[in-house]
Image (spheres, helix red, strand yellow):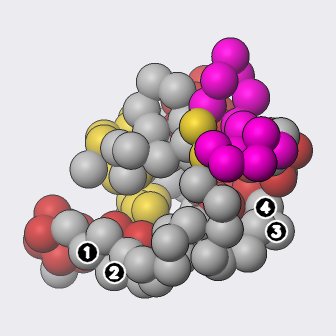
Amino acid sequence: MFLISRCCVGMPCRYRHNGHLRKVAIQLGSNEDFLAVCPEQLGGLPTPREGCNVVSGRVIGRKSGTDYTAAYEHGAHLTLALAQANNIKRAFLLSESPSCGNGYGITALLLTRHGIKITPI
């Protein structure tokens, strides 16, 4: 079983209320069970929501300047708990996301620190 960004299976959970159905998600899902999660929604953020950027480890709203870090961290920890409860060792995450972006996303960093291999899609 693997973890995948919920938007990558086409669910409209991105900040603009759209999804990003990825061909790789269809191919992977036909061969193995997966758990699709949206860390932002798990963290209590609405959909749609303000677009954000990661700035010096903080998640900041692009228009308002609001600091959303607490919600992003909460969603990341809930995602990690789900991954650990399901013995997940691999995650396929949306590459352009403040949660899931490999190398900077709040969730991606937390999962990596706990031994889960991230593949950006």
Contact? badges 2 and 4 (CB < 8 Å): no
Kind of residue at badge 4:
Gly
Which residue was labeled with disc 2? 10
Kind of residue at badge 2:
Gly
Q: Earlier in the sequence, mark 3 or mark 1?
A: 1
Residue 38 placement (x, y as % from top left): 58, 66
Check the image and report above or below for 31 versus 66. Answer: below
Which residue was labeled with disc 1? 21
Kind of residue at badge 1:
Leu
Q: Give the magenta range.
A: 54-66
Callout 3 crowding tier (Cα within 10 Å): few <14, some 14–19, many ≥20: few
Which residue was labeled with disc 4? 43
The alpha-carbon separation of the residues under discs 3 and 1 comes to 23 Å
Callout 4 crowding tier (Cα within 10 Å): few <14, some 14–19, many ≥20: many
Residue at the (66%, 60%) spot, across then down: 50
The alpha-carbon separation of the residues under discs 1 and 4 comes to 22 Å
**Quadrant hosting residue 42:** bottom right
Contact? badges 1 and 4 (CB < 8 Å): no
Residue at the (25%, 74%) spot, across then down: 21
Residue at the (56%, 67%) spot, across then down: 15
